[in-house]
Image: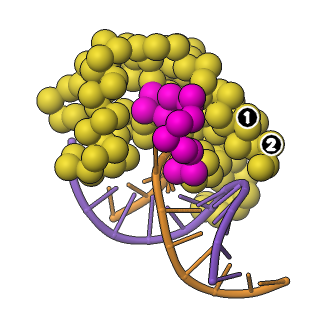
Chain colours: A yellow, B orange, C purple
Amino acid sequence: MNPFYHRIYRVVRHIPKGRVATYGVVARLAGRPGAARTVGWALSALRDDSDVPWWRVLNAAGRSSFAAHDHSGVVQRALLLREGVKFAPGGAANLALFGWPAEAYDSVAAAQTRAASSRRSRRLKGLRT
DNA sequence: GCCATGACGTTCC
DNA sequence: GGGAACGCCATGG
């Protein structure tokens, strides 16, 4: 198994109970920024008897990546609710409250900083004048 | 080694 | 604020 997966699992295992992280954040903590999809791939390969709390990983919108009627989605929401994570009417968790690590969601400024950084790097590449 | 796919993310309409 | 388009990294055929 690749070291990535091991790092990803290690990061996910590090998520405190009652908190949630996003795929993107997990990817960064695992040492591969931008590899959010790979995180999903790694988690999809998890076994049922795994000790990795995969349900604490949500997408950037703070929502489950499963369909509302999907079995895994139901399980995920139930587990999070049991840990105290509340969901907004839209089905999205408040990352500002439950996001981990807190620094990543501490303020809107953090997200804007990341966005600006991304946009800047893109411009430097000359992809868009 | 090239092409398609996926539990995603960010930027533009 | 919602949807479409492009980018990202690793895997499988």
Dot label at residue A122: none
Q: Which residue is mark 2?
A: A3
Amino acid type, label 1: Arg
Asked whether the residues under the numbered discs 2 and 1 touch, taking CB atoms below 8 Å apart as contact, a structural biologist would say: yes
Residue at image location 34% in from the left, 44% down from the top: A72
> What range is drawn magenta here?
A43-56
- Vertical placement of residue A105 versus A126, above or below: above
How many marks the image carries: the answer is 2
Label 2 element class: helix
In reply to whether residue A89 is colored magenta, the answer given is no
**Left or right relative to A71: residue A102:** right
Where, by quadrant of the figure, is residue A92 drawn? top left
Q: Residue at x 70, y 43 (%)?
A: A5
Quadrant of residue A80 within the rendered picture: top left
Residue that carries the numbered disc 1 in the rendered image: A7
Residue A58 appears left or right of A12: left
Q: Is residue A68 above or below residue B12?
A: above
Where is residue A63 shown, x and y percent of the image? 33, 37
Q: CA distance from mark 2 to mark 1?
A: 6 Å
Residue A11 vertical placement versus C12 (above, below): above
Q: Residues within 10 Å of mark 2 (few under 14, many from 20)?
A: few
Q: Residue A8: horizontal and vertical position, in percent?
A: 67, 36
Q: Name the chain letter of the residue that bears numbered label 1.
A: A
- Left or right: where does residue A114 sit relative to residue A22? right
**Front one among A66 and A113:** A66
